[in-house]
Image (cartoon, rainbow, N blue to C red):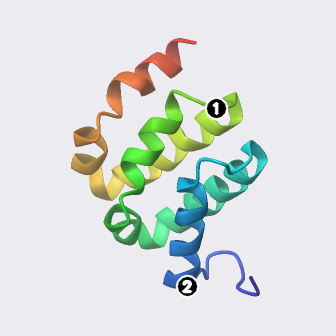
């Protein structure tokens, strides 16, 4: 993608979300995508909520590498500033508490 950090187009964001949803995506690729989503959440949180990223992030809290879990939690924290109800309604609190206890 020739787009600079913080300048992701909606189409590029949709592509990243599709890649994240794909079960065969490698852990390192998921980590890279989650880093992008953290950046995107600062300016396009509504789009991420619309793309149903929140339930996917909640699912990642319970599976994958420690880095993936941490990045998913960070993404949810970024989204919760504007979309707290979407994060809470997706069931993020129990897995985040569990993650904090480990």
**Looking at the figure, which quarter contains the C terminus?**
top right
Q: Position of residue 33 (x, y in %)?
A: 65, 58
Along the viewing direction, whichever of 89 and 97 lies nearer the viewer: 89
Along the viewing direction, whichever of 84 and 60 lies nearer the viewer: 60
Foreground tag (1 vs 2): 1
- Marks 1 and 2, the one that precedes in the sequence: 2
**Looking at the figure, which quarter contains the N terminus?**
bottom right
Q: Position of residue 30 (x, y in %)?
A: 67, 50
Residue at the spot of label 1: 64
Looking at the image, residue 12 sits to the left or right of residue 26; the answer is: left
Q: In the picture shown, does residue 94 fall above or below 25?
A: above
Q: In the picture shown, does residue 32 fall above or below 65?
A: below
Which mark is on residue 5? Answer: none
* Mark 1 element type: loop
Circle 2 residues within 10 Å: few <14, some 14–19, many ≥20: some
Q: Quadrant of residue 82?
A: bottom left
* Mark 2 element type: loop
Residue at the spot of label 2: 9
Query: Residue at the location (42% across, 56% down)?
Result: 53
Query: Residue at the location (59% across, 47% down)?
Result: 23
Name the residue at the front extreme. Answer: 24
């Amino acid at each position: 993608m020739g787009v600079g950090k913080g300048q992701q187009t909606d189409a590029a964001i949709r592509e990243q979300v599709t890649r994240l949803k794909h079960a065969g995506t490698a852990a390192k690729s998921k980590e890279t995508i989650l880093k992008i989503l953290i950046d995107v959440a600062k300016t396009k949180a509504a789009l991420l909520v619309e793309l149903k990223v929140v339930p996917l992030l909640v699912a990642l809290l319970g599976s994958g590498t420690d880095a993936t879990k941490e990045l998913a939690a960070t993404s949810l924290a970024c989204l919760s500033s504007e979309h707290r109800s979407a994060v809470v309604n997706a069931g993020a609190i129990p897995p985040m508490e569990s993650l904090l206890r480990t």
